[in-house]
Amino acid sequence: MPAQEAAGHGAAARRGAVPMLDTYREVLTPEGVSLHLPAAGPVPRALAWLVDLAVRAAIVLALAMVLGVLGGLGEGLYLVGLFLVSWAYPIVLEAAWNGQTPGKRALGLRVVAGDGAPVGWLPAVVRNLMRTVDMLPFGYATGLVACLCDRDGRRLGDLVADTVVVHVLPRPAGVQLSPTVPRAPARRLLPDEQAALVAFGERASHLSAGRQAELAALLYPLTGSAGDEGVRRLHGIAAWLLGRR
C-alpha cells in the first residue's frame, strides 16, 4: 500500500499537481534517451536566492567602503557597481558558470534550458529581466504563485525564457565491466549503424547496466549476442570504431 500511495503521488505530480515538493521533468533527447530532470521547488530556490542576496550585499558593502574615499567620482562608480551587481551578477554567472550563481551552487541547483541543454546568454538575460515582473507586487509574490501553479516549479521568467531550475545530481559511477578489448565488427556496418555504436560507446558510462543490456538486445543484429556478452561486444566494437586499438 505505501508503494501504491507513493506511485499515486508521483503520478499526480506528473499530471500537474502543485509542486510544493520537487518533481521530475521528463525530456526525450534526439538520440531517444529519456532524461529525468529533477526540477527544484520554490523552497530550495528561495534559499539559493537568500545566499545570493547575502553575497551581493557583501559586494555592495565592499564597494561602498572602497569607493567612499573618492568623493563624487567614487559615488558615480558606486552607482555603476550597484547596477552591475543587481543585474549583471545573475546573468553573467548563469550564462558563463554552468547555469549557477554562488547561491545555486551552494544549494546544488543550476539553470538549464527546457530541453536539458546548458542555458545560453539570451535565456539568461530574459529570465533575469523578467524578475521585475516576478517581484510584483512585493516579495516575489507573482513568481511564487507561478512556481506553485507550474508542474516544474517555474516562475514567469523561466516560462518566457524556456528554462528550468534543477537539482545537480552526482555523476553515475558507470558500469563496471571487464577491460574493453577493441573488436572489429563481424560485417561491414552502414553509416547509421556505425553512428549508433559510436554513440553507445560515448554515452555508455552514463547508462545503467539495465539500460546497456536493453540496448544490446536492440542491437543484437549487429553483434549476434545479447545480455552481458552483447554489452561487451558493443563496447569492443565501439572502441574499435573510435580508434582505440
Image (spheres, rainbow, N blue to C red):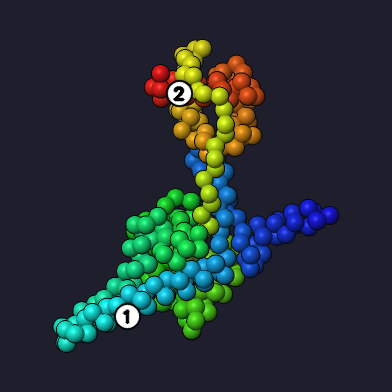
Find residue 17 and report its horizontal and vertical position in percent. 66, 64
Q: Which one is in front, 176 or 91?
A: 176
Apparent side of residue 130 relative to residue 6 in the rendered image (left or right): left
Find residue 231 and report its horizontal and vertical position in percent. 58, 25
Element type at mark 1: helix
- In percent of the image, x 63 and y 31: which residue is there? 214
Judging by the rendered image, the residue that carries numbered circle 1 is 61
In the depicted structure, whether residue 9 falls above or below residue 223 = below
Furthest residue toward top: 186
Q: Which mark is residue 239?
A: 2
Disc 2 marks a residue whose amino acid type is: Ala
Apparent side of residue 149 relative to residue 236 in the rendered image (left or right): right
Q: Are marks 1 and 2 in contact (CB under 8 Å)?
A: no
Q: How many marks?
A: 2
Instruction: Specify whether residue 192 is in view.
Output: no
The CA span between labels 1 and 2 is: 55 Å
In the depicted structure, whether residue 178 falls above or below residue 145 = above
In the depicted structure, whether residue 32 falls above or below residue 226 = below
Residue 91, located in which quarter of the rendered image? bottom left
- In percent of the image, x 49 and y 40: which residue is there? 30
Local packing at callout 1 (Cα closer than 10 Å; few below 14, some 14-19, many 20+) is some
Find residue 109 and report its horizontal and vertical position in percent. 49, 60
- In percent of the image, x 49 and y 81: which residue is there? 139
Apparent side of residue 217 relative to residue 170 in the rendered image (left or right): right
Furthest residue toward right: 1
Q: Earlier in the sequence, mark 1 or mark 2?
A: 1
- In percent of the image, x 48 and y 68: which residue is there? 48
Q: Quadrant of the N terminus?
A: bottom right
Disc 1 marks a residue whose amino acid type is: Leu
Find residue 194 and report its horizontal and vertical position in percent. 45, 24
